[in-house]
Amino acid sequence: MMNCKEVTRLLSEGYERNLTLRERLALTLHRMACIGCNNYGKHLEFLHKAANRLREGRDDVTP
Amino acid sequence: MTTNDARAREILWDDPAIALIRRDMLRFAQLQLRDAGAAEDMVQEALFAAMSHAESFAGRAALKTWVFGILRHKIVDHLRASSREICGADLVDATGPDGCMEDFDALFDRRGFWNPEDRPATWSDPEASFSQKEFWAVFEACLDHLPAHIARVYMMREFLELDTGEICRQLGITTGNCWVILHRARLGLRACLENRWFHGEAAT
């Protein structure tokens, strides 16, 4: 079983390359059992969305 | 159609909305270049380029997307031209096989599981933050807080959408190194946001 340190690295690499089926399976299993890493995965998605907003010159900010 | 275009062009320069877009562009450019003069020049050039094609967009949102697109291209060109100045060796040192993750190793215990106090918390409705200008100030502060070379790679990837291959070529580092740097940037940014933004939110 992968530990959290490896899982966080792999979650990040998922944005850089296609993970193998085996890696994706390991991530899913780990995330089901580990609230910290499951949150981490969600937080990375959030970071990615935030960067997208900033890149497009965020338009929806209330002044 | 033509009268509309002419009117659009007249309005553009006077519109206070343009001043706001310009301000956002400046902030975006400065964040990545850390050089106020170069950022200023680039924003000006991007605005001029956009204005000369003022016919091709309809409305402020379209204009903003358009000028930000131009600005990103200008920043990419600038980084390409100046990439020789970035010391790839620094990046390699910072992410070497041993020293690389020292600071973040502390987040995990000996077996590589989260320390209880560092375990990522549940953020409730994080995307609501997108409409708060204070959030963006924190986000930018957190980017600034990252070591400069790490922030640069992260922004090349996420803001300029260069793929890892190109970033590596430009900086003279390996793909593996690039991934580690991005991983580090994400760990750092995430922790910073949790401490400086979501932690406070959760408490309310």
Image (tube, coloured by chain):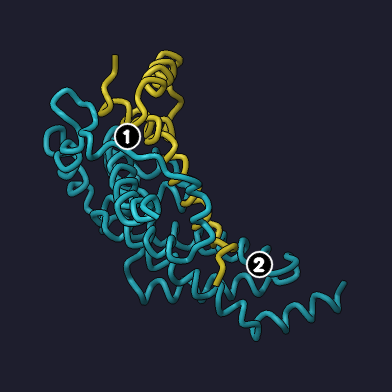
Task: Give the labeled residue for mark 2.
Answer: B63
x%, y% of residue B82?
33, 60
Q: Is residue B5 above or below residue B93?
A: below
Which residue is depicted at the point 23% across and 27% down?
B113
Q: Chain of mark 1?
A: B
Q: Which chain is yellow?
A: A
In the image, is B101 to the left or to the right of B203? left
Mark 1 and mark 2: span between their CA atoms? 36 Å
The quarter in which the N terminus of chain B is drawn is bottom right
Task: Give the labeled residue for mark 1.
Answer: B175
- Same subunit under labels 1 and 2? yes
Which residue is depicted at the point 67% across and 79% down?
B12
Give the class, few, some or many, for how many residues have Cα within 10 Å of label 2's Cα (few <14, many ≥20): many
Colour chosen for chain B: cyan
Where residue B77 sits, quadrant-wise, is bottom left
Q: Is residue A3 above or below residue B101?
A: above
Q: Amino acid at mark 2?
A: Leu
Q: Amino acid at mark 1?
A: Thr
- For the residue pair B37 and B22, the one nearer the viewer reads as B22
The secondary element bearing badge 1 is classed as helix
x%, y% of residue B165?
39, 38
Where residue B106 sits, quadrant-wise, is top left
